[in-house]
Image: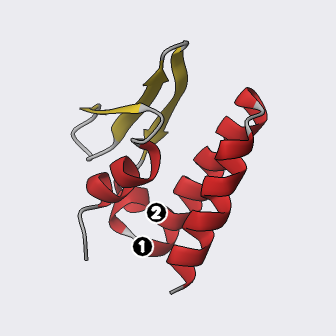
Amino acid sequence: MNSPFQKISDVFQPDYNVNFSIQKPDGSILLTLTDTAGVAVKRFISSSQWRDQQQLERLITSLQFSLAIERGGQTSSYRLTKHSHSAAQ
């Protein structure tokens, strides 16, 4: 299995700078996605979310939907489709 952090980075790095910060001793992290307009999203990720493949997939999809709603961009919905197809394989 690839690193969960690498997987998140691979999905979002074409359009966003991806930053992970360790937040708590329990392993939870803060994910920050930024672009030229500034901070696009900040999300706390529990250790159970980044350690479990299914929860990680749900997290990525949730982030993509949030970004698509916030930014209203068509490229976000393309990536949603692209990621969903790769996750299904």
Q: Residue at x 77, y 36 (%)?
A: 69
Q: Secondary structure at mark 1?
A: helix
- The amino acid on which the numbered mark 1 sits, given as a three-letter code, is Gln
**Residue 40's spot in the image, x, y percent?**
56, 24
How many marks the image carries: the answer is 2
Residue marked by disc 2:
56
Q: Is residue 26 left or right of residue 72?
A: left
**Residue 50's spot in the image, x, y percent?**
37, 58
Q: Nearer the viewer, residue 62 or 74?
A: 74
**Quadrant (top left/top right/bottom left/bottom right) for the N terminus:** bottom left
**Callout 1 touching callout 2 (CB < 8 Å):** yes
Up/down of 42 relative to 49, above or below: above
Residue marked by disc 1:
53
**Residue 62's spot in the image, x, y percent?**
64, 51
Q: Residue at x 33, y 43 (%)?
A: 28
Q: Quadrant of residue 20?
A: top left
Q: Is residue 34 left or right of residue 70?
A: left
Tell me how far mark 1 sits from mark 2, CA to CA.
Answer: 5 Å
Q: Is residue 89 left or right of residue 32?
A: right
**Coloring scheme of the render?**
secondary structure
- The amino acid on which the numbered mark 2 sits, given as a three-letter code, is Leu
Image disc number at residue 17: none
**Residue 85's spot in the image, x, y percent?**
59, 76
Question: Outermost residue, top direction?
Answer: 37
Q: Residue at x 48, y 35 (%)?
A: 15
Up/down of 52 relative to 15, above or below: below
Neighbours of disc 1 within 10 Å: few (<14), some (14-19), many (20+): some
